[in-house]
Image (cartoon, rainbow, N blue to C red):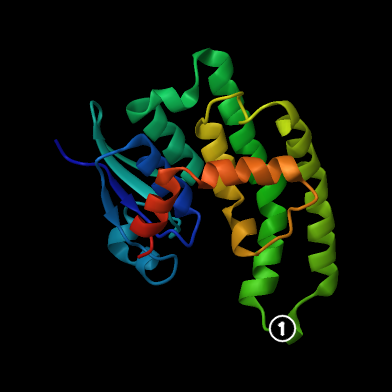
Amino acid sequence: MTKPILHGISSSRAFRSIWAAEEIGLDYQHVATSFREDSKQPGYLAINPNGRIPALVDQGEDGELKLFESMAINMYLAKKYGPELLGRGLQAEALVWQWSVWGISEIEPLQMQLVVQQFFLAQDKRDAGVIERATKGLGRPLQVLEAHLADRDYLLGDTFSLADLNLAGVMELLNMLSFDLSAWPNVCRWLEACRSRPSYAQAKAVGSG
């Protein structure tokens, strides 16, 4: 049987999908595809015409599947290969979707503003106003997360799920930014638990490119 093929590197959004594959224990082929030249080649564009990473190629009962968008890839991998990550029942799966979408709508846009300022602009070109507004803006969703985690270890309760992996994967950019999360101790505790999983270190190693 042909192995699933996952394209991407860990220093990108592809880390989320590499992490999911490692958490599931999936037997897959990793192709270290960067978000620069590699993802703009004709062969890769035939898989993901957006020229972005990650992308997945898998064989199924309906033929070859070419899939892009990290959250879609992760939901597919969990449904097919690691359903235990979705929790038990429709309600748990709905909560996985909720927190995954919440991460890319409430956290990611603001942290991306900080990424652009810190990593893509020369110091004399950075906009202090953008940095201040994005940093302040992150306080609202982080407080929502802080309150939610006050009486539970993980997003769905006492068990690690794809919701945790997806959201912690989104927030990996804050880790790269060395963003100060000390005002939200429950978030810090939860992130530490997520990042202490063996699959996290494995994904960092596998996806380094």
Which quarter of the figure is the C terminus placed in?
A: bottom left
Q: Residue furthest top?
A: 89
Kind of residue at disc 1: Gln
Horizontal placement of 30 versus 19: left or right?
Answer: left
Q: Residue at x 63, y 33 (%)?
A: 99
Q: Quadrant of residue 27?
A: top left
Residue at the image position 23 percent from the left and 26 percent from the top: 61
- Looking at the picture, tell me which residue is in the foreground, 91 or 47: 91
Q: Quadrant of residue 37?
A: bottom left
Q: Is residue 125 left or right of residue 168?
A: right
Which residue is at a point 58% across and 15% down the rendered structure image? Answer: 91
**Quick check: 134 above or below 185?**
below
The residue located at (49%, 15%) in the rendering is: 88
Instruction: Classify the position of the N terminus by image quarter.
Output: top left
Which residue is the extreme one toward the bottom? 124
Q: Is disc 1 surrounded by few (<14), some (14 to 19) or many (20+) residues within 10 Å?
A: few
Q: Position of residue 105 (x, y in %)?
A: 68, 43
Q: Nearer the viewer, residue 207 or 101?
A: 207
Measured as percent of width and height from the top left, residue 50 is found at 45, 56
Q: Position of residue 68 (x, y in %)?
A: 42, 46
Kindly identify which residue carries mark 1: 123
Q: Is residue 108 visible in this depiction of the protein?
A: yes
Residue 68, can we see it?
Answer: no
Instruction: Name the element at disc 1.
Output: helix
Say if 95 sits above or below 207 in the image. Answer: above
Q: Position of residue 3 (x, y in %)?
A: 21, 41
Total tally of numbered discs in the picture: 1
